Image: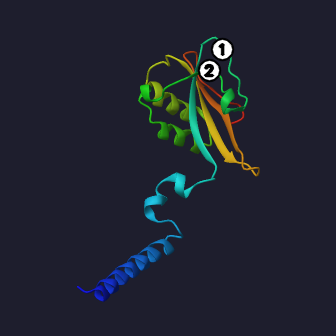
């Protein structure tokens, strides 16, 4: 192949690649599929919600106050050691709007099955948002206390 034919072939390939790229990005509102499945690319700056579980000694009283992430009381509690998927727990807590006895029993079952709880744990809903000052505000709201003595729901979220 001579130089002119090679240059023409390279331009043709480059043009085809650019057209295919432009069509795939334009039809997806600027999100090309490899990036849109990762929240860090497609949902940057949006509010988010996760769950956090903390363990308390049985004689501790429960505070239902909303606190900053650095001020969450209790000891860290591993949900994975109980066989609980963190994403399932986060979805359960963030999407439940009515915390009746059936929902609390389902949450208890998620952690302990049909057994009596071995630990006193509090499940928090942690919400993060970007403020107008471009600061990240993270707050933890205690939702449910699961305890060998019985379960309690935060009066502010109970319906």
Residue 85 location, quadrant: top left
Residue at image position (39%, 76%) is 17
Above/below status of 132 relative to 19: above
Q: In the orientation shown, which residue stands out farthest toward the bottom?
A: 4
For residue 142, the mark is none
Q: Quick one: SS at disc 1?
A: loop
x, y (%) of residue 47? Answer: 64, 49
Q: Which residue is mark 2?
A: 74
- Residue positioned 62% across, 43% down in the render: 97
**Quarter of the figure with the C terminus:** top right
- The N terminus appears in which quarter of the rendering? bottom left
Q: Is residue 60 above or below residue 134?
A: above
Residue depicted at 37% across the width and 83% down the height:
11
In this rendered view, identify the residue nearer to me: 71 or 159.
71
Q: Position of residue 93 (x, y in %)?
A: 57, 39
State left or right for residue 52 relative to residue 67: left
Q: Residue beneath label 1, please?
A: 60
Q: Identify the mark nearer the N-term, 2 or 1.
A: 1
């Amino acid at each position: 192949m001579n130089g002119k034919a090679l240059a023409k072939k390279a331009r043709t390939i480059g043009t085809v690649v650019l057209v295919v790229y432009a069509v795939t990005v334009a039809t997806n509102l600027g999100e090309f599929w490899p990036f849109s499945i990762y929240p860090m690319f497609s949902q940057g700056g949006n509010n988010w919600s996760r769950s956090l579980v903390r363990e308390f000694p049985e004689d501790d009283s429960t505070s239902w106050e909303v606190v900053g992430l650095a001020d969450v009381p209790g000891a860290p509690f591993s949900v994975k050691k109980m066989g609980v998927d963190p994403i399932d727990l986060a979805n359960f807590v963030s999407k439940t709007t009515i915390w009746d006895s059936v929902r609390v029993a389902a949450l208890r079952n998620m952690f302990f099955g049909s057994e009596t709880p071995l630990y006193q744990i509090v499940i928090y809903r942690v919400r993060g948002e970007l403020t107008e000052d471009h600061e990240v505000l993270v707050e933890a709201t205690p939702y449910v206390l699961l305890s060998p003595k019985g379960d309690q729901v935060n009066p502010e979220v109970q319906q």
